[in-house]
Image (tube, rainbow, N blue to C red):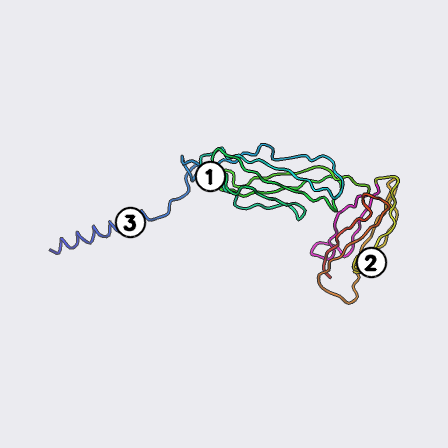
Amino acid sequence: PREGVVRTRVAAAALAAGLLVGCRPPGPPPNGNYYGDRPTSQAVVDQPSVDFGTVEPGTIVRHQYVLANRGEHPLDLLKITPGCGCTYVKPLDRTIWPGHTGILEVALDTHGLSGPQSKAVRIRTNEPGRPEIELRLHGEVASDVKATPDRVLLGRPGAPLSGSVDVVVLDPNVTVTGVKSQYGQLELHQAPLAGATRGVRIVVTPRRNGFSGLFNDRIVVTTTSKRQPKVTIPVMGAL
């Protein structure tokens, strides 16, 4: 009887060990393909990068991207992330069935933009081999005046307490008529650009006035241009 009890206990221990091994989560497959031979979705974009040419400032550029699912499993658009606040995305289909196509309408508001532009939209999907798709809209916004850089950071880690902006006048019939701080938080000094380039260089420093903390202001440049009567350059930082 004692020998039978021992055998029973050994068999029970072996069975428990087998159950534990069977319940252990599987490790990653050698080729990295968790789906194996199971059917999956496959996203195909006919034209992921679109050139909208040259437009006037303030134009709303629109384009409809066509996404096809050439896989055997539904394609889900899990997350859509525009590259900037001036880009808007309207997905007409969140799930694209096998053999079907879906439409994503992307709109770019060019108000306040000038010169060459390239804006991206990133889409996260459930496709195992290609979880992210990038769509791009690029072109040029016609301009008479261009500010470089288009924004200034002051006083943050790694950034100095003063900076400069070059406002270049591209049209020979246009002139700069004024430069000011929108909220009065900035000291601005301007001088003509060197050489044959028309325009002004603006040196900007924050007005302390006993203030400490984050600040957010804008340089406002007025011109005689009908296309760009006003150019604004954001200035952010900390004191």
State which mark lies toward you, 1 or 3.
Answer: 1
Q: Is residue 121 left or right of residue 6?
A: right
| Labels 3 & 2 near each other (Cβ < 8 A) | no
Q: Amino acid at mark 1?
A: Pro
> Which residue is drawn at the image coordinates 26% and 51% (left, top)?
16
Give the residues drawn in magenta, as a range: 145-169
Q: Amino acid at mark 2?
A: Glu
Q: Which mark is residue 129?
A: none
Mark 2, residue position: 187
Rendering quarter of residue 59: top right
Q: Position of residue 159 (x, y in %)?
A: 72, 54
Query: Could you give the CA–CA distance between mark 1 and mark 3, rounded to whole angstroms?
Result: 35 Å
- Kindly state the secondary structure of the residue where label 1 is placed: loop
| Labels 1 & 3 near each other (Cβ < 8 A) | no
Mark 3, residue position: 19
* Residue 28 within the magenta-colored segment of the rendering: no
Q: Earlier in the sequence, mark 3 or mark 2?
A: 3
Query: Could you give the CA–CA distance between mark 3 and mark 2, rounded to whole angstroms?
Result: 74 Å
> Which residue is drawn at the image coordinates 33% and 49% (left, top)?
23
> Which residue is drawn at the image coordinates 81% and 43% (left, top)?
227
Q: Position of residue 43 (x, y in %)?
A: 52, 36
- Kindly state the secondary structure of the residue where label 2 is placed: strand
Q: Is residue 135 left or right of residue 166?
A: left
Q: Position of residue 239 (x, y in %)?
A: 73, 62
Q: Earlier in the sequence, mark 1 or mark 2?
A: 1
Rendering quarter of residue 39: top left
Q: Is residue 107 left or right of residue 185?
A: left
Rendering quarter of residue 155: bottom right
Q: Nearer the viewer, residue 89 or 136?
A: 89
Q: Earlier in the sequence, mark 1 or mark 3?
A: 3
Q: Amino acid at mark 3?
A: Leu
Q: Tell me the quadrant of the picture where the N terminus can be found.
A: bottom left
